[in-house]
Amino acid sequence: MTQTEDKTKAKPGPTRRDFLRGLVGTAGAAAVVTGPTRKVAAATVPLSNVRLAPSVIGEGPVDPLERMRAELARALEKPVDQRRWVMVIDLRKCVGCHSCTVSCVAENHLPPGVVYRPVIEEEIGTFPNVSKRFLPRPCMQCEEPPCVDVCPVGATWQREDGITEIDYEQCIGCRYCLSACPYNARTFDRGLTYVEASEGESAAMVGAADAGTYELAAAHEYGEEWPRDEGRSPVGNARKCHFCLHRLEKGMLPACTTTCMGRATYFGDANDPDSLVAELIASPNVMRLKEELGTKPRVYYLA
Amino acid sequence: MSTTTPKKQLSLGLVPWLLAAGLFGVGLIGLVQRLLTGHQLVDYGSYVPWGIWVSVYVYLVWLEVGSLLVYSTIVYLFNWNHSLSSIKAQVYLAALTTLTPALLLIALDLGHPLRFWKTIVNPNFGSLMTWMVWLHLTYLAILLVKLYFVLKARQSGGTQYKSLLKVLALVSLPVGLALIGTVGGIFGVVAARPLWQQSVLPLYFFISALVAGSALVTLLYVLFGPVKERAEYRATARKLGMLTLGLLLFGAVAAAMNGLVTFYAGGPARVEAARLALFGPFWWSFWLVHLGLGVALPVVLLYLRPNAPRTVGFAAGLVVLTFVAVPLNVIIPAQLTESLENLGEAFSGPGLELSYFPTIEEWLVTAFALGLGLGLFLLAQHMLLTPRATTTEA
Amino acid sequence: MSEKTVQTQPRDCGLSRRDFLKISAAGSAAALLGSLPHVQDILANGNGDPYRLSNPENVIYSVCLNCHNACPTKGKIQDGVLVKIEGNPYSPQNMLVPLAEATAIGEAAHVDAPLCPKGQGGVQVLYDPYRLRKVLKRSGARGENKWEAIDFNQAVDEIVNGGNLFGEGDVPGLKDIYRLTDPELSTELKSDAAAVAGGEMTLQVFQEKHADHLDLLVDPDHPDLGPVNNQFVWMGGRMEHGRKELGKRFTYDSFGSTNFYLHTTICEQSHHIAYAMATGKTHMKPDIMNSEFIIYFGTSPFEANFGPTNLTQKLTTSMVENGLKVAVVDPRLSKTGAKAWKWLAPKPGTDGAIALGMIRWMLENERYDATFLAAPNTTVANACDETSYSNAPFLVRLDDMTLLKAEDAGLEVPTDDEGSPISSKVVMIGGAPAPSATATELADLFVDTTVNGIQVKSGLQLLKERAEEHSIDAYADIAGIRGRDIVELADEFTSHGKQAVADFYRGPVQHTNGYYNGQAIITLNLLVGNPDWKGGLTSGGSHWHEDGSKAGGPFAKDVIVSAPGGLPHWGIYVNRERATYEKSTLFDGYPAKRPWYPFTNELYQNIIPSAAAGYPYPIKALVIHKGTPVLASPAGHAMIEILRDPKKIPLVIGSDVVVGETTMYADYIIPDLTFMERWGIPHVSPDVVTQVSKVRQPMVAPLTETVTVAGEEMPISMEAFMLAIADRLKLPGFGKDGLGEGFDFTRPEQYYLAMAANLAFGDKEDGSQQLPAADEEEMRIFREARAHLPATVYDEDVWRRAVPAGLWPSVVYFLNRGVRIEPVDAAYKGNKMGHQWKGEWKLYVEDVAQGKHSLTGANFDGLPKVEPILDAAGNRVDDPGFDLTLITYKEVTGGQSRTHGAHWLNAMLPENFILINTVDARRLGFESGQRARIIGPTLPGAFALGDGRSYDSVGLVKVAEGIRPGTIAVAWSYGHWAYGSNDVEIDGQVVKGDPRRARGIVPNPAMRIDPVLGDVCLTDPIGGSASFYDTQVRLERA
Ligand SMILES: Nc1nc2c(c(=O)[nH]1)N[C@H]1C(S)=C(S)[C@@H](COP(=O)(O)OP(=O)(O)OC[C@H]3O[C@@H](n4cnc5c(=O)[nH]c(N)nc54)[C@H](O)[C@@H]3O)O[C@H]1N2
Ligand SMILES: Nc1nc2c(c(=O)[nH]1)N[C@H]1C(S)=C(S)[C@@H](COP(=O)(O)OP(=O)(O)OC[C@H]3O[C@@H](n4cnc5c(=O)[nH]c(N)nc54)[C@H](O)[C@@H]3O)O[C@H]1N2
Ligand code: SF4
Ligand code: SF4
Ligand code: SF4
Ligand code: SF4
Ligand code: SF4
Ligand SMILES: [Mo]
């Protein structure tokens, strides 16, 4: 179903932030108070049901993805302002497969021209001493995000868990934030679809109309349903990686993290000293992109 | 020196009307396209978020604010009052009619034009863009009030609102200045774009507005000034020509200095962006349109024939027209450098290219907006001002 | 020398042994939680659920087929639409440590596993606007791309009955080919024909005896060619298990034709053949998680191989966490090469020289596992802590190059417990000959002597002599690298004990010398004795047996693999694979008219040319299914001419999802279902070290037209086509009781559910491996997850009735997980693999040594050797004036030629390019971004496609450092001229193509046509591989 009617959106900007803090801080109560908006969904995760690591340790090895999922559940038990989501990307493991890029596109129903996590390739050296470097680039979820301040309508702001969110219904599509992001992490949804450029039409073939249903199906960003339709958000909006907030709220890791076949992508709560990401960002080979700009990215790279 | 003495009001005949109608008519196709297909047929997008519409917007703001700035300054602060006040209405009208296409273009550039009101209702005053909107609207209000009283004064033939107008003019000065500065600041604060991020950028916008504005005032004066008072007319035209020449030279020197600093001391990304501005795909717009037609030729003309109002007018007209290349050259190339090397090849799609050239739709919509602006001016001039075209103030 | 240096010091067999192992599980040392309750059950079914895709009701597990790796997948379905494909978290192919099988499916719904990008692009392969819904019949000349959409059943009738179908004269129908229908008669003819071929019966006697039935033979003068039925040929491209068994069952058993083929020789067949000749297994892989050093020859596990999803995560984890070192030998810098400790860029086709150089160094420096090599049989090997042994010490007679037999050595032939003789070869032990089978000690390794008057050498001795034919520098010269590169590689390879593996795939083998290159590389593994060792070479965890080959299962092999009441299939294969020229009645001295291929099968590229040449015989009907020989084979475009001429092959039927590059030359195209809408039971890559079976099942409603086949409604598909033909011709194995007593075969799913039932039952006769029964909750989820499927593909009653009553809940349990797996702790037994190969490794391949080249009559070699690029007649191929060697490779985002409609994937690389080294580019004056035309010795320029268009091999130039100078590389998957890229006319109406799908260049037409044969590419005479990397070309500005 679509939720256009339900979109009783909180005011953007600080108000909304406060709203969120209030809600997520007091999980149980919020459910009663505010009806079926996404904030509530996030807050009503029956966190007490999540049995955490030490109590259910199994024998033998566990996949790092499962470890991180357990840590995610643990983090969801805490109030939102005590979580600090970070992503760690081990460049030694990244093989430039673009699985993460595609997974993100599919997860968020990204249309042509919109990409949240491109992987940049570079050839280094001269024959025969040559190498290639691969650099996945999600949104850095900057601690000091230049994209936020520039927004004339406060449609984008930083959550307390560190994710910079965009309110699609508030965003006027001025693209100032695109200009302001030093990482080109924001892209503009021009309202295209992949299938429409195929003109083929015959009763003997599937045809663009039937083939295109998957592109029109609602995306789930920010825990709401976003069916694709002309002139309707997120068409006309700035879009970017949101650390798959809608999945986090369901206790699931971001799509690029689970799909990463190089196992180069890690995700978790840096405030949890026992988390894998906390361990990793303590490595000596850690770095962040364009540190000199003072944006303080929450995406760390291991080189 | 000109040998023929103008006998009557300079007239370009039907040419401006045809031009306006042509731009409007052809441009309408683009407008319809834009309304029907949204942003599907444009070339700006993600890596080059702002294209010709934003650039032309900046140009129009320069004209709009610059002309009034120059006019108010010379009239009220330097008291070149006498013959200049005859074109007061035209100047205000010109400012207003440049503002219309400016706002139209910026609205069409938005992903959700109908949400424009949110900038008023949910403003984020941490953003210069919010300030720009608010300043622009304030400016618009002042302008409307001014125009109202100017017209009223014309109707009554009297001079009763003089002091009020002066006050308004003096109030509009800082607002205009702030607007220009803010528009410059919008770009100037963007650390992500090395060519923009310079504290001097607002200053440049200011100088540019003055150059464009003085050229526009000069042009308006040559077109609508008191031809009958030959000596006065010629002298004022000369003065305006000289003012424009001076500002033009000042601007050119300042820009050149800044360019040198950029090339010698700028970081690689900034140098690359500057290189793109000068030698990139838009080299011709810089060298031929801006430097050639917009600076060199007018400078030569103004220097050689300062006493020929037609030549002065022509030179001023050239500056006005070609100045559109300046914001294009500031805004576009800065966006053509990669924030991260090879990003442009990582994922391809519309709007993800590190290149930009306006599509037909973008040109058409621009044409529509300019045609609309020109048409409005001509209409207003025709309907509101023509009957009194020959009257002059004492 | 480090502790792990491989050396010849014999080990203390059976006593203390060095600990080779550094054990590190799955990269995460910490013990973690084993299961996480599914946190969302409470919200799961709520209205306005913000993320329905985490509910098990929105999930169906299946298996990918965007490449042959067949990764288990998890389809996420939203309002009946497949919106996303993830990896299956229960699968050891997707996870480093899979979820335990018992994990609740509600919880698993919250776990997504890794998957390669192509697999995710499946959504766009499914929802492809150019996919066919209805049967197309050509309304113009062949290849003219003019079609009419016709009724499925009408098409089947026309195909079965033949007649004047196209206004071009009579076309034989399948009924005219399905002639020999009596199994007994067929069996008799088969054995008598064999007798004629074997010289035990004269032709005259045969013809007299079978005078009444001679018309049932392709050629009564050559009865060994088989029955007329053989003139029906099924040419399958990618058919995985499930469909593969069905395809063979249909062609062989039901139709009685021996001509069923897959495409493996344009894939990597010489790799399979080299392995099979040495080990009996076609494919082995390193145990990556525990290897310390791996050399990848001509393969990129990060981009291709088998396959990126599973290989990549193990490699990167092992490299970063466990210190695994990797070397890559590839003329092009692959993504794997980019991460490697060492990248060597040899001249294409010279891997054999590198491996032989390494072998020479290893033998000279005594860096081989002498103990392993000296074990003459399993008993001794086991005593030395080995699972396997090799024939390295076996003696080879120099007179006929056979292995010396015990009886010929004058030894007493050993006997088993019951006293019957054991065929045994001979080894030397302390200088005395002994039967290999019963020897109890380690044998002598290097032997050069005379036994019983026969001059013999041990296999290892022969290898040493072979390796010594060139100096290391000379080998390096051949390969265009430095001698010290070879030494470094060999040194490193022998510094990790048994945790070093040499892996390879297409690069070394898709050459005319492919088999030898492969054999040389394989031998490296033999010398360090790594098979079955943890961190060594493994044959993988394998799978349970869906084919009924295990006793006690619900469906036996003779209903699954063969058709009850079916026909024998026999006769010489139309492509002369698995056939010995000398043993056929067509033998007529050397050279043979066209080459015969005694050692290979699934020989693809020469099927159509052979049929057209009528050697060994012409064919009448050809089905081209899920393969595009014209596009995918080197110089495949040469087949266009043949296919366009209906006189050459009168009836061509395409089974395709679109109008493809090859099916555009068909008479009919039968739409097929994509892998997301259908069934399959694919097998697993040996890289996965625990056992796993998987099931591909429909995830969403089919997009092809619904038709009625013998009273049953179903979507058009390959299976529907087979069922319809079987119905018309009354073929055995279909219809009532087609799958055995009480089990009809009237619908596609019945066949696959029978296989699924076998898997749910397990491999143990006593039923002890039967999967648990799905409980009520699982049953509910099973139904709800399929609520969007129409009855034409999912009807619970039909499904339930397709399997034995008690098994249904276990089958559901299996379908609910998409895989059945064993626990991860089954992976290892001490220092060995849990699943072991335990075989005899043939260093010396006697069979191949005994085989003859059918054009020269010369014997092949039983050992690896350096061989230049040769044509069919054994002459060196040299094309002066063509200064660049063309190679090809796979992008990680390209799935063969099948994914160019998947725009998500193409966004990364909308157009491929001609990769050229800076040095060559400078020399030739090319810059990145320019366009160039590839001119080959047999491709002077554009060629005609037959519909008025022509194809010109022009592509974008990309100048780079990561490619060997003198070589250019062009990625596969681009350069389509059909497949939705072009306009086609259907029912008089033009359907516009999508220009995005035409972008890029396909290098295959530029590859060389064999100068002797003139209609097919160069081919490896042993392994059968088509040559992809041997053509000299030049570039022209375009
Ligand atoms: N992305 C992707 N992966 C796939 C598939 C797919 O379609 N796409 N298909 C699957 C299938 S069917 C197969 S067969 C496998 C194939 O798996 P691979 O064999 O790994 O894949 P290719 O890219 O064909 O490998 C050819 C490699 O050999 C190199 N090469 C060329 N000539 C030579 C040579 O003479 N010597 C050496 N040493 N190297 C050479 C090429 O540069 C290239 O890197 O991939 C499987 N996985
Ligand atoms: N240049 C170059 N050429 C290569 C390779 C390379 O690396 N480089 N790789 C080679 C290798 S390893 C292989 S395995 C071969 C593969 O070659 P093929 O076996 O020919 O496989 P595809 O190229 O994928 O062609 C499959 C065709 O089947 C049709 N098809 C797709 N999906 C379906 C389906 O679900 N059902 C049916 N009935 N039809 C379908 C499509 O029309 C498609 O054209 O290509 C080889 N060719
Ligand atoms: S990376 Fe860009 S979009 Fe993301 S938070 Fe930082 S500035 Fe904003
Ligand atoms: S595009 Fe949207 S989010 Fe970005 S600055 Fe403009 S209004 Fe804000
Ligand atoms: S976290 Fe989610 S939104 Fe961000 S890049 Fe990864 S998949 Fe895309
Ligand atoms: S999926 Fe992982 S390995 Fe592949 S490109 Fe993305 S980060 Fe790198
Ligand atoms: S590796 Fe092959 S089978 Fe596995 S997901 Fe990728 S394309 Fe599919
Ligand atoms: Mo293949």
Image (cartoon, coloured by chain):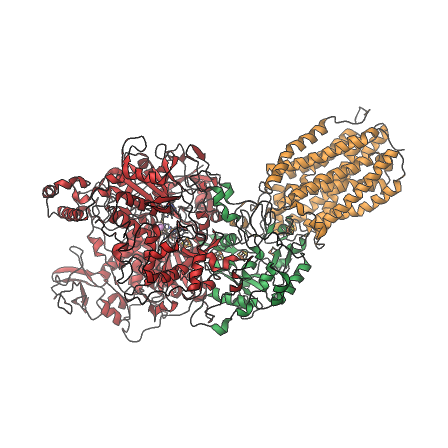
Q: Is residue C546 left or right of residue C200?
A: right
Can residue A91 be seen at all in this image of the molecule?
no
Query: Which of the pair A58/B371 is nearer the observer?
Result: A58
Rendered hue of chain B is: orange
Give x and y (percent) for residue C837.
Answer: 29, 63
Query: Which of the pair C914/C424 is nearer the observer?
Result: C424
Can residue C902 be seen at all in this image of the molecule?
yes
Rendered hue of chain C is: red
**Up-down relation of residue C630 to residue A23 (above or below):** above
Q: Is residue C60 left or right of residue B101?
A: left
Instruction: Give ligand 7's quarter of the image.
Output: bottom left
Q: Is residue C83 left or right of residue C1028?
A: right
Query: Which of the pair B213/B105 is nearer the observer?
Result: B105
Give x and y (percent) for residue B289.
Answer: 66, 36
Give x and y (percent) for residue C830.
Answer: 34, 71
Rendered hue of chain A is: green
Name of the residue lying farthest toward the bottom = C15
Image quadrant assignment for residue C661: top left
Give x and y (percent) for residue B223.
Answer: 78, 30
